[in-house]
Amino acid sequence: MRKRLSLIVILISFVPFSVLAATMPTIAFEQSNTIMVTAGPAKEMTHRNNTHEHENVIPYQRKGIQQLIYDRGYNYTVAENRVTQLSYEDRKALCGYKPITAPEENVSENVMFFSCLPKAKKAKLKAVEAESQPSSSYDAMALGYVTPVKNQGACGSCWLFAATAEFESMTLKNEGVEFDFSEQELGDCNIWSTAGGYDFCDGGNAFMTANYFTKHGSATETCHPYAATQKTCYNCAALKTVNNWRMITGAEGESQIDTIKNAIQNYGPVYSTIYASDPGFRGYSGGVYEYWGPEAVNHAIEIIGWDDTLPHTHGTGAWLVKNSWGTSWGASGPYPGCAWVAYGAANIGDYTTAIASYEDSEGVIFYHDECGWMGYQYGGWGPTAYGAVRFTPLQDLTLTAVDFWAVDSNMEYELKIFDTFNADSSSYSFSVQRGTTQTGTIDEIGYYSILLDTPVQLVSENDFIVQVRLTSTESDYPLPIDYYDTSWLPAWSEIATFSGESYYSADGSQFYSTSFYDIGIRARAVNATNPCNKGDFNCNGISADADDLAMMVDAAVGKYVPEQKYDLNNNCIFADVSDLEMMKDASEDKIELM
């Protein structure tokens, strides 16, 4: 149980001075962190969606709120800004973060909802933190890794802005190029909006943005400018696509300070959340913000740094936060539009996630899990399970990576690609393996794209099967599935369409259809076109000359990773012994490469 003081604030109405003299406001203090100011005796407060409700909401009372902040010993200031001048309904709309939630009843014996932060992950992260203590301060803005502060308007789209801010920071850090990604495209083109008419201003979370970024990527603001209201998907061309994404903390992230610091040092600024319905936060101007109430987080922000030395009433240390409420908010803070927030205050740090890597949006991704992973797992027969999905390419391609959602930390995986799908009366099996078997381990919950050691050539309209064995250390339900049971989103049955091409197995020999749920396994491929003639590696118009032979020899002995063009015998193993012999024969005019 978290024990925190909180202070409840309800704003007073402006009344004529003659009336005010007869009805001086009463300021009631409670064991909570919101200041309660009412005209007359303190009135009962109601709650809806983690925001303060009061029928007679009035203009922002800066002086009264500031005095109460000082009375509590806090050292931050408030001022009028764009947010404080909004109507009550518009202020409510600003906080749109909605975490995924567990269902009220079990879905089936083979489906369960995951624990946000498995014990194994906590133990492992503690061990990592003990070995690698983060620095005492960090400022991504000062390092040039943060793009300008934006303004979400009177719309609960903070979950979109935090996601694009993080993606922009990563590309700026890695490439030195400042991209302005489109929040509107992300909001209008996600599957809940396109298939279910969902209004992104009603809120969302990082699982939804990660699903879109990994499937489609991010487009420019100029292609689809922000309108602060639901529009139509433009299907803009994506520039960058996320291929690795991690869940850093769960519902107790406010206490996992070093975990978040390490993530920022490893990946860059991160997506995180905070409780933001406190009037002190809405009017934040400068200093170290504090709020120690128990309310759940309801607003997404980007954490861009920290300083362990900044004092506050609960100790020292604060996060450097980039908000999406424009630059009039936090005008006297560390940077306009940014704030210092005390470690643990307002539950900051819950549901922190990070983009681990991305790529240019040039390839093709195969998937059946339209809604991605929303916390549901499949299994029930032990810690190891096999998942498989079948895809059919519409053009010749080279398969380069296998992607999947990892439902637990410390998972082991095994990847195989098969060419032939076999069906009998009750089960399925796969044969004619392509490429090589690949194994490994993952250390964090999230989305993984595993590059294949041996890329596989795909032929148009010839199906292939991706099989992944997953072993969990914490759960008997290791397979990620496309399913959710959330009241605030359109019903899953109205959004997702079962492909009929997802399969599971307990032992890897006999597979069965999942019947309703697609498994969260995907595949990435690139165009297989070779602009040069076969065997003409240096593209000089002469096939199998001395330079081409030398390049084949170097590739065969492992001096560099060979490309598809080195697969002369079309067995999908690049620069093997047979390819080398064919090149030697061609260089001696014994054969002609076709």
Image (cartoon, rainbow, N blue to C red):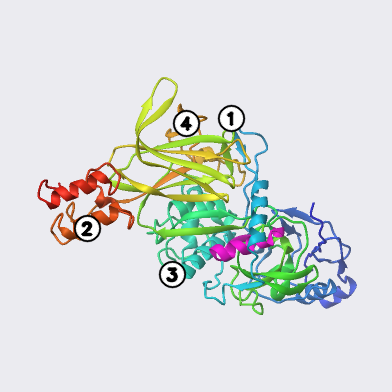
Residue 120 badge: none
SS of the residue under disc 3: helix
Name which of mark 4 and mark 2 comes first in the sequence. Answer: 4
Kindly identify the residue that appears in the image at 25 percent across and 51 percent down: 566
Does 310 appear above or below 267? below
Q: Which residue is mark 4?
A: 508
Q: Nearer the viewer, mark 4 or mark 3?
A: 4
Q: Which residue is mark 3?
A: 175
Instruction: Locate residue 445 relative to residue 243 in the image: left or right.
Output: right
Amino acid type, label 3: Glu
Q: Which residue is mark 2?
A: 550
Q: Dot 2 surroundings within 10 Å: few (below 14), some, or many (20 or more)?
A: some
Q: Residue furthest top?
A: 425
Q: CA distance from mark 1 to mark 3?
A: 46 Å
Q: Which residue is mark 1?
A: 381
SS of the residue under disc 2: helix
Does 570 appear above or below 94? above
Circles 4 and 2 in contact, beta carbons < 8 Å? no
Q: Nearer the viewer, mark 4 or mark 2?
A: 2
Instruction: Locate residue 498 relative to residue 316 in the image: left or right.
Output: left
Query: Where does the magenta region start and end?
Result: 254-273
Name which of mark 1 and mark 4 comes first in the sequence. Answer: 1
Q: CA distance from mark 1 to mark 4?
A: 13 Å
Name which of mark 2 and mark 3 comes first in the sequence. Answer: 3
> Picture quarter containing residue 269?
bottom right
Circles 1 and 4 in contact, beta carbons < 8 Å? no
